[in-house]
Amino acid sequence: MNATLRRWLLYPSIVMAGSAVGWSLTSARLLGLGYDVHVHALVFALALLFYNRDRLADSSEPDDQLNMAERAQWVVAHRRALRLLVGAAAAASALLLAQRPAALAPILAGLGFALAYSARRLPGGRAPKQLPGLKTPYVAALWTLLIVGVPLAGAGRPWDRQALLGASAIFALVAAQVTVNDIRDLEGDRLVGTRTLAVLWGERGARLAAILCALLAAAAALALRSRGLVLAAAYTTAYAAAYRRPADSAFRWLIEGAGIATWLTAVAAT
């Protein structure tokens, strides 16, 4: 693939936002919600908004400079374009939310948690993301709110047993993805004092934690009798087991496109 196109798909989180839509489509299929174009477009816009907001805020931070030097330099060089993208995503989110106001509650909850995540309000000027081991469940919970909570609220469906099992499976799959990403970010997180599972347990321990999360997702998927999610858990287990930091670029599409792969798997398995 052309290098310029690859950067535009990965660095402004286009693939990640597409993956969020894949996860939300999987949730809708799993829970029998039907497909609501407004809801899934809202998920895409919100993912673009939050990820690119973080890219703009963090590109000059020492951990980003160390973990993803090429991406950080790209963000600095394209700061104006990313600001326009954030503005467009915010406007699209507002317009789409006006069409589905029932989705406001999980979005506000997620927004509050997202803003608190990096806020240095704890003793010693620390942020919640620096607390030992908190990043994986925190980020997985935010994603679960977005890709399960928003479609559920938009459809006016309560959190029943099936919804809780589906959310548990997706939470565990996203937790595995976050943990693998933290293996990549090990040195930068250690530098700034963000004590992720990879920092606490090392690369091998974090990889085992990611595999365990994928296996827990498989257990929830079996309880739901979802062949698609079982296969998605196998996919996640495979890349978590195979991931190595020196070959990170070879895994980017597999990891950031995991939601798209899960959706395609869910369709193929039915």
Image: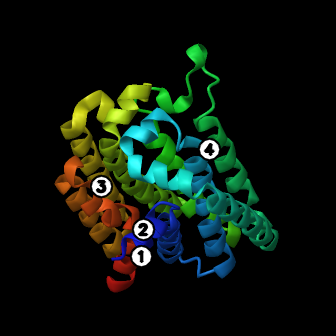
Disc 4 marks a residue whose amino acid type is: Ala
* Circle 4 SS class: helix
| Circles 2, 3 touching at the beta carbon (< 8 Å) | no
Mark 1–mark 3 distance (CA, rounded to whole Å): 16 Å
Q: Is residue 148 above or below residue 67?
A: below
Asked which secondary structure carries label 2, the reply is helix
- Mark seen at residue 259: 2
Labels 4, 1: front one: 4
Q: Nearer the viewer, residue 204 or 145?
A: 204
Q: Which residue is mark 3?
A: 214
First in residue order: circle 4 vs circle 1: 4
- Residue 238 numbered mark, or none: none
- Image position, residue 64 (x, y; %): 45, 41
Q: Cα distance, mark 4 to mark 1?
A: 25 Å
Q: Residue at x 21, y 43 (%)?
A: 208
Per the image, the residue denoted by label 1 is 263
- Local crowd at mark 4 within 10 Å, few (<14), some, or many (≥20)? some
Q: Which residue is at the front of the view, 186 or 141? A: 186
* Image side of residue 150 versus residue 6, left or right: right
| Residue topped by disc 4 | 114
Mark 3 closeness class: few <14, some 14–19, many ≥20 residues within 10 Å: many
Q: CA gap, disc 4 to disc 3?
A: 24 Å
Q: Disc 1 residue type?
A: Trp
Q: In this image, 238 relative to 88: left or right? A: left
In the picture, the quarter occupied by the C terminus is bottom left
Is 21 placed left or right of 247 in the picture? right
